[in-house]
Image (spheres, rainbow, N blue to C red):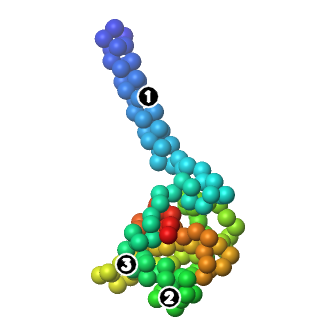
Amino acid sequence: MDLKRIGRARGVATLTLGLVLAASLGTFLVQARTPQDPLLPGSNAAVLVESGLPVQGRQVMDLIRQGGPFRYEKDGTVFGNRERLLPSQRRGFYREYTVPTPGLNHRGARRIVCGGLQPKAPEACYYTEDHYSSFKLIVQ
């Protein structure tokens, strides 16, 4: 094998290794999640003032405090937090509620998830507009 072929083979190997490392790093970054502090609900979540919710979200917050009635059968059911984006709590702590999206004839992607022992007086509520991919802590 002459020196040109050896140089080309080394260059291909270096390029391949670089692509593998870049793909691995990209996968790691996508899968990495910031741990949440269970003592500080939503400490790593963005914050959203309740008045900044869409009109439908503010209406749902009022219904939550009243105990309903809710529009969708699934509203008020247990939210499992399988995505692990909310602070870790025992099963049954979180409940989900649909925030209707005008123009859709289905539930859409917007939800409010509230946690606490008393559903009418939640300890913390979170808003997601992308079906649990991200959450914002709702504050008064």
- 47 up-or-down from 92: above or below: above
- 45 up-or-down from 66: above or below: above
Task: Indicate the amino acid at tag 1.
Answer: Leu
Q: Label 3 belongs to which residue?
A: 55
Q: Label 2 belongs to which residue?
A: 70
**Mark 3 and mark 1: span between their CA atoms?**
51 Å
Which residue is pictured at 39% across the width and 18% down the height? Answer: 10
On the image, the x and y values in percent for residue 41 come to 60, 61
Front-most of 85 and 56?
A: 56
Pointer 2 with pointer 1, Cβ within 8 A: no
Label 2 SS: loop
Front-most of 124 and 24?
A: 124
Select label 3 or label 1 by which is in front.
3
Which residue is pictured at 51% across the width and 64% down the height? Answer: 137
For the view shown, which residue lies furthest in the top direction?
Answer: 3
Label 3 SS: helix
**Mark 2 and mark 1: span between their CA atoms?**
55 Å
Task: Indicate the amino acid at tag 2.
Answer: Phe
Label 1 SS: helix
Q: Residues within 10 Å of mark 3 (few under 14, many from 20)?
A: few
Q: Label 1 belongs to which residue?
A: 17
On the image, the x and y values in percent for residue 86 come to 57, 61
- 70 up-or-down from 13: above or below: below
Visible in this render: residue 94? no
Q: Residues within 10 Å of mark 1 (few under 14, many from 20)?
A: few
Q: Quadrant of the N terminus?
A: top left
On the image, the x and y values in percent for residue 139 come to 50, 67
N-terminal label among 3 and 1: 1
